Amino acid sequence: MATNIVVPELGESVVEARVARWLKKEGEAVSAGDALVELETEKIDLEVSADRAGVLSSIKHAEGDDVKVGEVLAILEAGDGKPAVA
């Protein structure tokens, strides 16, 4: 089952952020609570974390991209990142 990693609420008057740095790569296994990406705004910098364990299957915005609250940053798939045994 896939989960969308989205830009969280950033503050009362902040509606946009910039993707500063990806801390995980596509295909990498992550644990619940792992920081995935750093976002920058005019007022704050924050990390967006995984809400569950899985594999970061797809990154939708590159470093330097501007994103709005609610936009999908990445897709997290269920699994552990290890190939299935045949």
Image: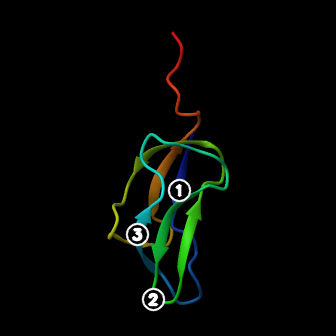
Q: Which residue lies at the image location 45% right of the left edge and 88% below the top edge?
A: 42
Q: Residues within 10 Å of mark 3 (few under 14, many from 20)?
A: many
Q: Could you tell me which residue is drawn at 43 percent across and 79 percent down?
A: 16
Foreground label between 2 and 1: 2
Q: Residue furthest front?
A: 23
In this rendering, the answer to whether 14 lies above or below 8 is below
Badge 2 or badge 1: first in the primary sequence? 1
Disc nearest the viewer among 1 and 3: 3
Q: Quadrant for the N terminus, please.
A: top right
Mark 1 / mark 3, whichever is N-terminal: 1
Number of other residues with Cα within 10 Å of mark 2, as a class: few under 14, some 14 to 19, many 20 or more: few
- List the residue tagged with mark 2: 42
Q: How many marks?
A: 3
The one nearer the camera, 25 or 9, is 25
Q: Marks 3 and 2, how far apart in space?
A: 13 Å
**Where residue 46 sits: x, y (%)?**
55, 74
For residue 19, which numbered disc appears in the image?
3
**Distance of label 1 from label 3 (alpha carbons):** 13 Å
Whichever of labels 3 and 2 marks the residue nearer the N terminus, that label is 3
Instruction: Please tell me whether residue 61 is drawn above or below residue 32 in the rendered image.
Output: below
Q: Residues within 10 Å of mark 1 (few under 14, many from 20)?
A: many
Picture coordinates of residue 59, whole percent (x, y): 40, 52
Residue 5, disc: 1
Viewer-closest of 1 and 27: 27
> Label 3 amino acid?
Val
Give the CA distance from mark 2 to mark 1.
22 Å
Which secondary structure, mark 3?
strand
Q: Tell me the residue at 56%/68% (across/down).
A: 47
